[in-house]
Image: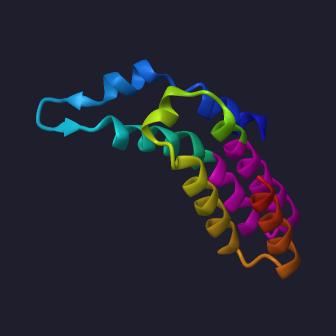
Amino acid sequence: MEDVCNGLCDLDDEELYSRSGRKKDRYVEPYDEAWVMIDEVLDPFIYEMKKYQKLNMPILAKEYCIGIIKGIQNFGKASSDILEWAEDAPKEKIETVFDEWKEGHPSEEDIAEVSQIIEED
């Protein structure tokens, strides 16, 4: 899904630096904040995927899951300052999306299909 990759690639390192570092009452690690920023981009997409599952629309949920995964895969191949702080994020976030999708009880065939897409990367 192009929107996922664009949202992740649009994460700005300047925003990362402004949101991290010394704060009034604590210190925020850039590493931790990079993960927070990635989650902020992905959460609406994951919410939408789960919504399709709750509405008993398994085909749309699977397509949405695949789109999110492909968007994250493309982000992982891109050049991004955020990835310097969260280099494991693409792999971990793909696993998270896949696990959350599987909580909706997709068919074994659908699980195999999505697993293959993940493994092909």
Residue 16 figure quarter:
top left
Residue 87 location, x and y as percent?
50, 43
* Residue that sits furthest to the top in the current view: 14
Q: Is residue 91 magenta?
A: no
As drawn, 105 above or below 46: below
Residue 60 location, x and y as percent?
84, 58
Residue 108 location, x and y as percent?
83, 81
Q: Is residue 50 magenta?
A: yes
As drawn, 113 above or below 34: below
Q: Which residues, given as a range, are shown in magenta?
A: 45-73
Q: Main secondary structure of the magenta part?
A: helix
Decide which of 105, 83 is in the foreground and name it.
83
Give the residue drawn at x 68%, y 37%. Answer: 77
Decide which of 26, 44 is in the foreground and name it.
26
Residue 23 figure quarter:
top left
Give the residue drawn at x 42%, y 43%. Answer: 36
As drawn, 32 above or below 105: above
Residue 82 location, x and y as percent?
49, 32
Decide which of 58, 55 is in the foreground and name it.
58
120 horizontally vs 33: left or right: right
Quadrant of the rendering where the N terminus is positioned:
top right
* Residue that sits furthest to the left in the current view: 25
43 horizontally vs 73: left or right: left
76 horizontally vs 19: left or right: right
